[in-house]
Image (spheres, helix red, strand yellow):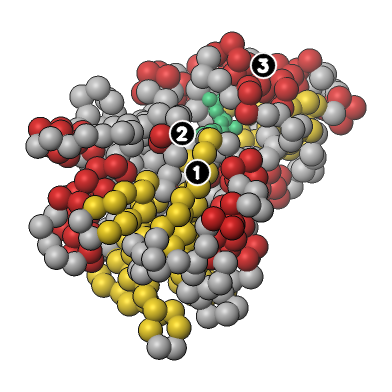
């Protein structure tokens, strides 16, 4: 998961990066960081916490210059510690660099072992630190050649934004697994961000997506900022389907497709594939709202916001124990009883992972007087852990790994459970390209495998 941003050729670049990170807070809440360059030196501020916790007005007195890169972290490799916050900064033979990374490298361990064997010392558990070492150890004279040398060693999913004192490099892996787009600011400067929703907040115009396998180099010329492009790898596009299903913000456009519209389509197709005799359709807020609208429209049944979400549940409750997870759902969601009482209800969510949320919600709806509760999931059954940057538990913890929809219905107390088919998801996404469907079909096309212990990466 995670968000990355790079801003080049504009005054107060770090403030633009800050607002972009604020717009992309949903991509990671563990830590946030910005590094800025004024041409002579790179300064860096990063810490655990939300964007608004980490930075204040004084931060921007430190983070000066026309280039800034930033990162919001959601740990999928490494640990939740301040050391593992990004950007990662280093001094090396050619000067100073900072790196921000979204994605997961599947050959992390192989490269790390090799570097350690040769005497490298690591400060963090992050796969991103490998890249710093590879750049520092490369024998090439120019930074651009060192960067190319280094990324050629990497497998898996990555969007990198790399900053030197004068330039900014942007690289997206050849599969284009994680999203990355380029926008232009009103004063002619550039912004590159994981999601286009960041552009809307800072008033940038969307230019295009970074192509899979492409490297962009931003530099200053006489007329201001400019960038050139180099195709480093033959593109083999496999954008992540989960960005559309759950992760990205509904107002973002990824690789030409609006996230909200795609979710509505998933819901409509789900209505055809898994209809139910019901009186009302409720979404699980907020993740299931768009799909539930499509599902209700598909069935011609009223869509009702029958569950209220409390938006003030703090991070204190995000603890990885089963007991706390159960409590978390109740703290977050509560039903509007008079809308639900005596009704046959379909409840729509975007995905089912362990089954914890749905079990609690079904119980909640039955206690609120629902006559029947039919769970509908606007994604296929998740049977495999993602190794490319979406946080998923082990295969054994995934409820669909060991249970059929009928068994899940029994386990969570629902009258029925229905999932979108893989074909239905492909129809919703469009057949114009292959998507990464690894969580559903176990096709680890970019390395890695279902078993984390015997996997080359992670
Ligand atoms: P579970 O309760 O374990 O079945 O998880 C399903 C809920 O988690 C759904 O409401 C999803 O919106 C949400 N969800 C799905 N994928 C993720 C993820 N990678 N990280 C956090 N939440 C997720």
Q: CA distance from mark 2 to mark 1?
A: 8 Å
> Which dot marks residue 82?
2
Q: Is residue 303 left or right of residue 18?
A: right
Crowdedness of circle 3 by 10 Å Cα count: few (<14), some, many (20+)? Answer: few
Which residue is labeled 3 in the image?
Answer: 327
Question: Would you identify the image quadrant in which residue 221 lies?
Answer: bottom left
- The answer to whether 39 is drawn above or below residue 272 in the figure is below
Residue 139 rendering spot, x and y as whole percentages: 10, 57
Q: Mark 2 near mark 1, Cβ–Cβ under 8 Å? A: yes
The residue furthest top is 323
Q: Secondary structure at mark 3?
A: helix
Residue shown at 21% from the left, 39% from the top: 107
Question: Closer to the camera, 405 or 32?
Answer: 32
Whether the residue under disc 1 has CB within 8 Å of ligand 1: no
Residue shown at 56% from the left, 72% from the top: 11
Which residue is labeled 1 in the image?
Answer: 46
Residue shown at 46% from the left, 50% from the top: 44
> Which dot marks residue 66?
none
């Amino acid at each position: 998961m995670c968000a990355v941003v790079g801003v080049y050729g504009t005054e107060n670049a770090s403030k633009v990066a800050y607002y972009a990170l604020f717009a992309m807070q949903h991509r990671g809440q563990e830590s946030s960081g910005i590094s800025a360059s004024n041409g002579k030196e790179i300064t860096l501020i990063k810490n655990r916490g939300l964007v608004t916790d980490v930075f204040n007005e004084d931060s921007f007195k430190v983070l000066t210059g026309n280039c800034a890169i930033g990162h919001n972290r959601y740990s999928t490799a490494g640990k939740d510690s301040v050391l593992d916050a990004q950007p990662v900064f280093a001094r090396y033979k050619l000067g100073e660099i900072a790196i921000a990374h979204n994605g997961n490298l599947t050959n992390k361990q192989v490269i790390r072992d090799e570097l350690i064997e040769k005497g490298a010392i690591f400060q963090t558990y992050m796969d991103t630190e490998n890249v710093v070492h590879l750049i520092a150890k490369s024998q090439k004279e120019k930074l651009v050649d060192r960067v190319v040398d280094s990324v050629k060693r990497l497998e898996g999913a990555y969007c990198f934004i790399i900053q030197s004192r004068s330039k900014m490099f942007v690289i997206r892996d050849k599969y284009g697994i994680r999203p990355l787009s380029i926008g232009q600011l009103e004063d002619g400067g550039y912004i590159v961000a994981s999601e286009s929703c960041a552009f809307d907040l800072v008033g940038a115009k969307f230019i295009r997506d970074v192509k899979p396998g492409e490297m962009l180099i931003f530099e200053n010329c006489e007329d201001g900022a400019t960038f050139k492009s180099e195709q480093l790898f033959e593109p083999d596009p496999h954008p992540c389907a989960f960005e559309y299903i759950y992760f990205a913000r509904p107002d973002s456009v990824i690789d030409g497709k609006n996230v909200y519209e795609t979710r509505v389509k998933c819901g409509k197709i789900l209505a055809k594939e898994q209809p139910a005799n019901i009186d009302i359709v409720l979404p699980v807020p907020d993740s299931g709202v768009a799909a539930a609208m499509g599902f209700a429209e598909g069935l011609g049944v009223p869509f009702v916001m029958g569950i209220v979400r409390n938006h003030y549940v703090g991070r204190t409750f995000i603890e990885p124990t089963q007991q706390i997870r159960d409590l978390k759902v109740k703290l977050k969601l509560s039903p509007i009883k008079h809308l639900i009482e005596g009704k046959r209800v379909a409840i729509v969510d975007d995905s089912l992972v362990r089954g914890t949320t749905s079990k609690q919600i079904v119980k909640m709806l039955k206690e609120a007087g629902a006559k029947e509760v039919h769970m509908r999931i606007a994604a296929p059954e998740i049977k495999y852990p993602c190794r490319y940057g979406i946080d998923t538990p082990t295969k054994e913890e995934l409820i669909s790994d060991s249970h059929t929809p009928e068994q899940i219905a029994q386990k969570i107390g629902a009258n029925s459970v229905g999932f979108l088919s893989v074909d239905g998801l492909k129809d919703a996404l469009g057949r114009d390209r292959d998507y990464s469907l690894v969580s559903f079909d176990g096709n680890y096309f970019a390395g890695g495998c279902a078993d984390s212990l015997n996997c080359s990466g992670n």
